[in-house]
């Protein structure tokens, strides 16, 4: 038994002796690459390239931002831009909804929007007061708005009939003036237009100031604000076309109409100096029906919810 144990130990130690006897061989693969520290010049070149790319990106963003500010300034210049959202132009009492509930809803909406407009005007007036013991630098002069709209609108109608683009560009805002000038260009060059305001109707009521508001509408300008007013004008107008060579009225072109028109005036107000640009004609709008009001309110509410970060499921709940 002892001889068997010694024989096993002798044979078991032979592989270890053979391993110790063999030299350790390391195979080198020429295809293997090792990372090395880049040179100083290469680092400088990479930093310069990254700096140029960053500067170009910042310059492009600044240029786009500047272009956007300039575009907005041109769009809102002299009171341009859209009609204030939620502008409420009340129907005559005879055209109010017949249903008691709809009547009450319409009248309440009218009062609410009148309060919004009056508050915006009052806030601007109070802002123009250096302190509570001095008079405001800015005055609304609401009594002058309706007569101004009446005179300017008549001047616009007469200039449009005469094809006087210079006057239109002077008293109308850009988009409205372009629209009128395009209509003049579409006329038959062999025909002219005669226009006359025969008279004004409802002199005890009209012209009537229907809406008056001041708001900051340009997101890129916190100083210049926009003042808008809507004036109802009731008049009888006569228009006809005539032959330029003979002066004879074109048969069937004479029209005599009683019109109720809602004229929109707009101008810019400086919230620092409280200086105002001259009134310009924005165009005309229509009276607000209950259906139109509810549709616009739904659109405004949805947009406000989107800006506040509410999703549709949250608003429905």
Image (cartoon, helix red, strand yellow):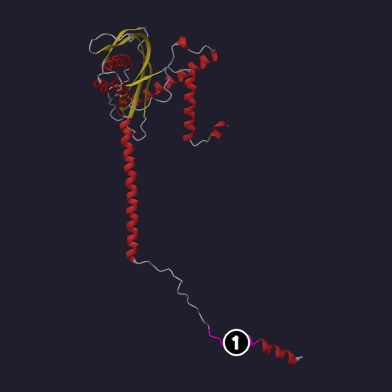
Q: Is residue 279 above or below residue 55?
A: above
Residue 166 in which image quadrant: top left
Range of the magenta residues? 13-23
Say which quarter of the image contains residue 73. top left
- Which image quadrant: the C terminus? top right
Nearest the eye: 20 or 315: 20
Left or right, 29 with reference to 149: right
Residue sitting at x 27%, y 11%:
242
Q: Residue furthest left?
A: 245
Q: Which residue was labeled with disc 1? A: 18
The local crowd at label 1, few if under 14, some if 14 to 19, many if 20 or more residues have their Cα within 10 Å, is: few
Task: Tell me the residue at 67%/86% (across/down).
Answer: 12
Extreme right residue here?
Answer: 1
Q: Is 176 drawn above or below residue 41 in the view shown?
A: above
Q: Position of residue 139 (x, y in %)?
A: 31, 21
Visible in this render: residue 129? no
């Amino acid at each position: 038994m002892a001889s068997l144990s010694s024989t096993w130990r002798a044979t078991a130690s032979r592989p270890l002796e053979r391993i110790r006897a063999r030299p350790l061989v390391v195979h080198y693969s020429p295809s293997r690459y090792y990372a090395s520290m880049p040179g100083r010049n290469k680092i400088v070149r990479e930093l310069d390239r990254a700096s140029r790319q960053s500067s170009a990106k910042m310059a492009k963003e600044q240029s786009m931002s500047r272009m956007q500010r300039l575009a907005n300034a041109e769009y809102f210049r002299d009171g341009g831009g859209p009609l204030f959202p939620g502008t409420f132009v009340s129907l005559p009492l005879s055209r109010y909804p017949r249903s008691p509930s709809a009547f009450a809803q319409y009248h309440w909406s009218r009062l609410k929007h009148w309060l919004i407009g009056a508050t915006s005007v009052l806030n601007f007036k109070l802002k123009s007061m250096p302190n509570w013991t001095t008079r405001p630098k800015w005055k609304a002069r609401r009594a002058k708005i309706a007569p101004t709209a009446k005179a300017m609108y008549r001047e616009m109608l007469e200039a449009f009939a005469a094809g006087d683009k210079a006057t239109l560009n002077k008293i109308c805002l850009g988009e409205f003036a372009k629209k009128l000038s395009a209509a003049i260009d579409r006329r038959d060059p062999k025909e002219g237009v005669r226009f006359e305001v025969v008279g004004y109707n409802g002199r005890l009521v009209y012209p009537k100031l229907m809406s008056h508001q001041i708001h900051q509408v340009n997101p890129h300008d916190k100083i210049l604000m926009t003042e808008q007013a809507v004036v109802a004008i009731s008049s009888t107008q006569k228009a006809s076309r005539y032959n330029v060579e003979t002066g004879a009225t074109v048969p069937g072109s004479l029209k005599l109409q009683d019109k109720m028109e809602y004229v929109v005036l707009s101008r810019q107000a400086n919230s620092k100096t409280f200086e105002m640009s001259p009134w310009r004609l924005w165009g005309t709008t229509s009276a607000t029906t209950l259906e139109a009001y509810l549709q616009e309110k739904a659109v405004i509410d949805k947009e406000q919810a989107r800006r506040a970060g509410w999703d549709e499921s949250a608003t429905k709940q």
